[in-house]
Amino acid sequence: MEGERRASQARSSGLPAGGADGESPGGSAPFPGNSGSSALLQAEVLDLDEDEDDLEVFSKDASLMDMNSFSPMMPTSPLSMINQIKFEDEPDLKDLFITVDEPESHVTTIETFITYRIITKTSRGEFDSSEFEVRRRYQDFLWLKGKLEEAHPTLIIPPLPEKFIVKGMVERFNDDFIETRRKALHKFLNRIADHPTLTFNEDFKIFLTAQAWELSSHKKQGPGLLSRMGQTVRAVASSMRGVKNRPEEFMEMNNFIELFSQKINLIDKISQRIYKEEREYFDEMKEYGPIHILWSASEEDLVDTLKDVAGCIDRCCKATEKRMSGLSEALLPVVHEYVLYSEMLMGVMKRRDQIQAELDSKVEALTYKKTDTDLLPEEIGKLEDKVECANNALKADWERWKQNMQNDIKLAFTDMAEENIHYYEQCLATWESFLTSQTNLHLEETSEDKP
Amino acid sequence: MEQAPRDPERQLQPAPLEPLGCPDAGLGAAIGKEAAGAGEEDSGVDTMTHNNFWLKKIEISVSEAEKRTGRNAMNMQETYTAYLIETRSVEHTDGQSVLTDSLWRRYSEFELLRNYLLVYYPHIVVPPLPEKRAEFVWHKLSADNMDPDFVERRRIGLENFLLRIASHPILCRDKIFYLFLTQEGNWKETVNETGFQLKADSRLKALNATFRVKNPDKRFTDLKHYSDELQSVISHLLRVRARVADRLYGVYKVHGNYGRVFSEWSAIEKEMGDGLQSAGHHMDVYASSIDDILEDEEHYADQLKEYLFYAEALRAVCRKHELMQYDLEMAAQDLASKKQQCEELATGTVRTFSLKGMTTKLFGQETPEQREARIKVLEEQINEGEQQLKSKNLEGREFVKNAWADIERFKEQKNRDLKEALISYAVMQISMCKKGIQVWTNAKECFSKM
């Protein structure tokens, strides 16, 4: 299910905008928005009266219906935004529709890979046109995720399906695997589209709209591999320090994440196991009915009864097949996505800790006068802003994520319960009608016997 | 009390109409009354009334099972299970039952009883015993003979065995059966004194007859095929059922894990906590419900197993017929050859090769006196042979008639019982579905409140 736009709690300075925009994450950033933005905007708007530049930007009118003008992301006027916010929860407000389908195999001399067709339909002004069709491969998705994480280190980025699943995989490209991955990729993109901040990310837009060669050249920009690696090493080292001074609420968050991760992993295993057991039950049941038919061939009196029993068993067999497929559609993907989410969350915590660690190390340096301390106060100021920004971003997104999680889990399990109820109701009906027919037959027979 | 040794080959009538010796007043009276009134006890028509009549008179139950240790024939320690058999006679007027007999028997004694009945009632489809060792087990079921569930199911099976005999119009009157229920000590000796083991047809003889018989009654041939098919299909069904039960067990039990994890998870959730916790409880209920469900199904399996074993009893009757028929054919053949010899001697022609012909050629013709003597001997033998053939023919026909009557009775019983079993299977499935609906409806409510 798509993430909901939620009226989040009021917060102070703005969330950093998408990367290519070039806005510094430190200051109150203009929040590019248009119809369908969340109430985050509202808080933004009201608090930004001291920043004249932003107000100016806000007063510009961007026509929603002007599809053809390629203009940088421009928000509508505050008034129109307030009006829109009332309708926030209605699905009509969604203005970005994405589908992922048509997996296709490509064979080159070096490798074989799968691409997926991505169709985007939108009414947003900043998009060149209202419909786009592109082909992307898994690597491209990985790239997008990386960019999003880079731009928003403490936002909860939706998880990608795994690169490959070692256990139980015979061939990398078997149909089930591809289908599961396709669905997960579809979910991934839609979750980004539903996220109040990520939906306006520039890289996201490019991912959805650019032609293959455009994307390649765009990808080549940005920090190189080596510098990224350097960042990772520093990140690991400093995140350890960040843990020490982690504020209380984030300690709580971390505890939750750890426990949640444990539990959701267990639930994932249990659910997979249930599917496996149901499949094996189904396989055995398929053999069970026909034996009764075989038996009826050597009987006289019992023929009808045996054939009826065989029929009932076969019908129950079909019902069990349906139950299995319901489980694999409603429950398994959701639970698995949250397994991946829990890993993602731990990464987010680390990044938050790392940002804090940067600040802490500078503060430490200042306190102990380890290095040249002239520039430190200014740096510290910037870092303090950075930390506050990161923390607020995470807090907001955390609430939103938790709410989504509750809804998703609730729906998934309710669906599973519904599937089971339906299964048992079908089987019940089958056997009850058999019983009725037997009693009716009996009554007929006994009335025939009477002289 | 000696029971006169009976030649099973000659026996056509069921066991003695009058119980031998001095029977217990109550039970004996019942039997006597039955015997006096019954002229055509083996006709199918009277079966129903006989059954009801008999069952009203006494109640038999195998009420307990007990582990015992003792010394066996080779003076070695062994552990075995003993079963308590209680017999009650029911008063007409007030329906109250009075305990008349109670004794302990072990499985091997039941086997002895059955083997005796097989020898003395070869034309009857003798009810089978419950299995000696647990077969068609699925992983949760134990294959151990001492396992309490197995013992319990065997107890029920043994009771069923005794009730089947007691409700059989012919078998119920047997003296040895009566003593089985009433005379604890010395019963084994009494059975063995009948010498029934000696009278049993040898397997080899029976096998030989099966291969060589030329003209068996077609009905018996068909019956043999039917019993083979029945055995094969029920075995197959029981095997698959066991596998299905295994898988079903797995599905239910894994859901139980949800219970534990939900409970742990609910500790960290504020809004979802209650819903998770109570849903988890329902998952536990679901998981544990399978135990009763499968136990009921085990009884269904036992009902099918009885008929699996009945197939062998059917084959035993067919074998007996083939043996008798073969015997008859051999006797007829023997008679024909003797007649021919006689004829040749009388007319002086030697049409076929014979030892006499050879020796005549070698040693010279015999004297007329010698020939007369031989003819006389042959004529005597032929006479005897004709008598024997006549009585064998009669026996054969009687056997076929009586056996077929019992087989018809058996068929009716089988159709009734199996239909009932299949219906009870449906009832079990319905109950399982209803339980499932209830649990999942409760769980769904909990989930939706999360």
Image: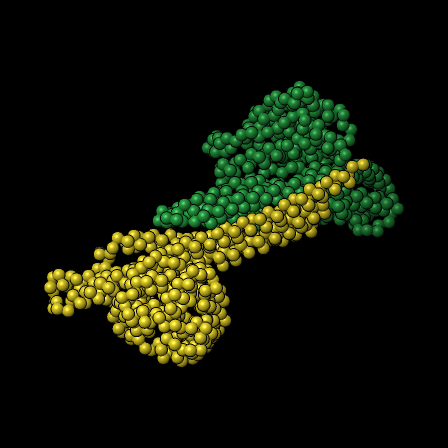
Chain colours: A yellow, B green
At a point 14% along the width and 63% down the height, the residue shown is A365
In the rendering, at what x and y percent does residue B196 appear?
65, 33
**In the foreground, B145 or A240:** A240
The C terminus of chain A, quarter of image: top right
Q: Is residue A440 visible?
A: yes
> In the image, is residue A312 above or below residue A113?
above
> In the image, is residue A321 above or below residue B442?
below
Q: Is residue B71 visible?
A: no
Residue furthest toward the right?
A: B347
Q: Count numbered badges in the picture.
A: 0
At a point 56% along the width and 45% down the height, the residue shown is B433
At a point 41% along the width and 57% down the height, the residue shown is A404
**In the foreground, A266 or B291:** A266
In the rendering, at what x and y percent does residue B65 appear?
52, 31
Left or right: A342, with B387 as reference point: left
**In the foreground, A211 or B252:** A211
In the rendering, at what x and y percent does residue A311 appear?
64, 52
Q: Quadrant of residue B419?
A: top right
Left or right: A281, with A237 as reference point: right
> In the image, is residue B274 above or below residue A10?
above
Q: Quadrant of residue B97?
A: top right
**In the foreground, A176 or B79:** A176
